[in-house]
Image (spheres, helix red, strand yellow):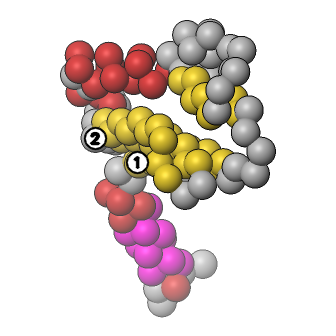
């Protein structure tokens, strides 16, 4: 929770498909960044370590050399490779928007009231 009372959430999902088959995945959901647990922080660090996906024989990159990126190395012809990364970021702003709407309605009512300048 931020000092303003706003709650932030974060999620990331990485999927790699080869010819329609899921070959690699990583998923992390943190419902409240202000109250992140040690396990969630470790999982976030693990996703940031990156991943190497190798398809076929004779790949030349070391599986640990991907850094913090997703690296897909393919030595086969005719492969359909799909990599998806989905970020889910949530902000609890409903209360703030309702407050803004209330102030806007009050302001408009005061301006439209009889006897207003």
Q: Is residue 101 left or right of residue 74?
A: left
Residue 40 at x, y percent in the picture: 28, 25
Q: Residues within 10 Å of mark 2 (few under 14, many from 20)?
A: some
Report the front residue among 94 and 59.
59
- Does the magenta portion include 105? yes
Is residue 102 rendered to the left or right of residue 59? left
Q: Earlier in the sequence, mark 1 or mark 2?
A: 2
The residue located at (57%, 29%) in the rendering is 53
Name which quarter of the figure residue 42 lies in: top left
Q: Which residues are magenta?
A: 100-111
At mark 2, the secondary structure is loop
Q: Residues within 10 Å of mark 1 (few under 14, many from 20)?
A: few
State which quadrant residue 25 falls in: top left
Q: What secondary structure is the magenta-colored segment mainly?
A: helix
According to the picture, the residue beneath numbered tag 1 turns out to be 91
Q: Residue at x 40, y 48 (%)?
A: 91
Q: Is residue 12 visible?
A: no
Secondary structure, mark 1, is strand
Please say whether residue 60 is one of the residues in the magenta stretch. Answer: no
Residue 61 in the image: state x and y as whole percent.
68, 14
The residue tagged 2 is 31
Q: Is residue 107 left or right of residue 66?
A: left
Which one is closest to the eye, mark 1 or mark 2?
Answer: 2
Q: Farthest front residue?
A: 57
Residue 82 vertical position relative to residue 4 in the rendered view, above or below: below
């Amino acid at each position: 929770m931020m000092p303003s009372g706003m709650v932030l959430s974060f999620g990331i999902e990485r999927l790699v498909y080869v010819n329609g088959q899921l070959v690699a995945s990583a998923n992390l959901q943190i419902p409240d960044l202000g109250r992140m647990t040690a396990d969630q922080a470790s999982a976030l660090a693990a996703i940031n370590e990156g991943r190497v996906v190798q398809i076929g024989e004779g790949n030349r990159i070391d599986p640990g050399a991907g850094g913090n990126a997703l690296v897909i190395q393919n030595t086969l012809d005719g492969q359909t490779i799909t990599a998806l990364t989905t970020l889910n970021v949530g902000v609890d702003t409903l209360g703030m928007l309702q407050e803004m709407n209330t102030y806007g309605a009050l302001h408009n009512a005061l301006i439209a009231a009889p006897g207003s300048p």
